[in-house]
Image (tube, rainbow, N blue to C red):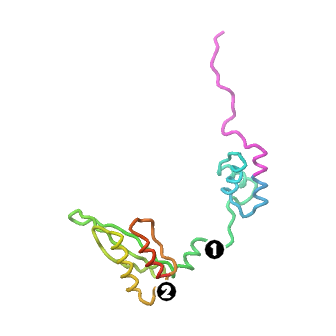
Amino acid sequence: MKRRWTYPKHGPGRPPIRPTIRALVLRLAAENPGWGYRRITGQIAGLGRKVSPATVWAILQRAGVDPAPRRSGPTWAQFLKAQASGILACDFFSVETVMLARLYYFAVVEHATRRVHVLGVTAHPTAGWVAQQARNLILALGDRTGDFRFPIRDRDSKFTAVFDALSAKLV
């Protein structure tokens, strides 16, 4: 008789979740109602067990528990709407000219009014140039500088300590 190669018989799909893991997930969710599925995943990982966030999500969904409970407090959109009058965001954008030269524009946006201030244009922005543009903005805003509490910028190297000190005057 000829021998045939056969694969081991396994059921389709992933293996089932261990009942101990399922019980642990449900216990953590019940004892800590403010935790979401990712926090529960992290706590289980801290105990030395590896469970994916998708698995924790599925366990909570099947048990009728909200995997991502609402937190007390405002949502991000509500926070931004409430604080929009105090947000001033600045950044660079670039434009290619007809002669293929790149120009950098330094712009500031008032979130409450959506007013855009283009502070300056240069081919070679430096930290000193950016600081001078911030000084010009403070002069242009005049007595409205106290209205802004949250100056937002990225981590560009042109935003130095001098710029930070000037933006602190806005706050």
Q: Report x, y in % for residue 11.
A: 69, 34
- For the point 41% across and 74% down, the residue is 162
Which residue is label 1 attached to? 74
Q: Residue furthest bottom?
A: 143
Determine crowd level at label 2: few under 14, some 14-19, many 20+ residues with C-alpha closer than 10 A.
Answer: few
Q: Report x, y in % for residue 2.
A: 64, 11
User: Could you say which quadrant of the image residue 108 lies in?
Assistant: bottom left
Which residue is label 2 attached to? 146
- Identify the secondary structure beneath mark 1: loop
* Residue 91 vertical placement versus 24 (above, below): below
The CA span between labels 1 and 2 is: 25 Å
Left or right side of 124 for 11:
right
- First reached walking from the N terminus: tag 1 or tag 2: 1
Residue 16 within the magenta-colored segment of the rendering: yes
Quadrant location of the N terminus? top right
Q: Amino acid at mark 2?
A: Gly
- Closer to the camera in the image, 10 or 50: 50
- Badges 1 and 2: C-beta atoms under 8 Å apart? no
- For the point 74% across and 59% down, the residue is 65
Mark 1 against mark 2, which lies toward the viewer? 2
Q: Residue furthest top?
A: 1
Q: Report x, y in % for residue 103.
A: 28, 68
Determine crowd level at label 1: few under 14, some 14-19, many 20+ residues with C-alpha closer than 10 A.
Answer: few
User: Could you say which quadrant of the image residue 20 lies in?
Assistant: top right
Left or right side of 154 for 121:
left
- Closer to the camera in the image, 57 or 64: 57
Q: Main secondary structure of the magenta part?
A: loop
Q: Which residues are magenta?
A: 1-24
* Residue 135 vertical placement versus 9 (above, below): below
Q: Amino acid at mark 1?
A: Pro
Q: Report x, y in % for residue 138.
A: 40, 83
- Identify the secondary structure beneath mark 2: helix
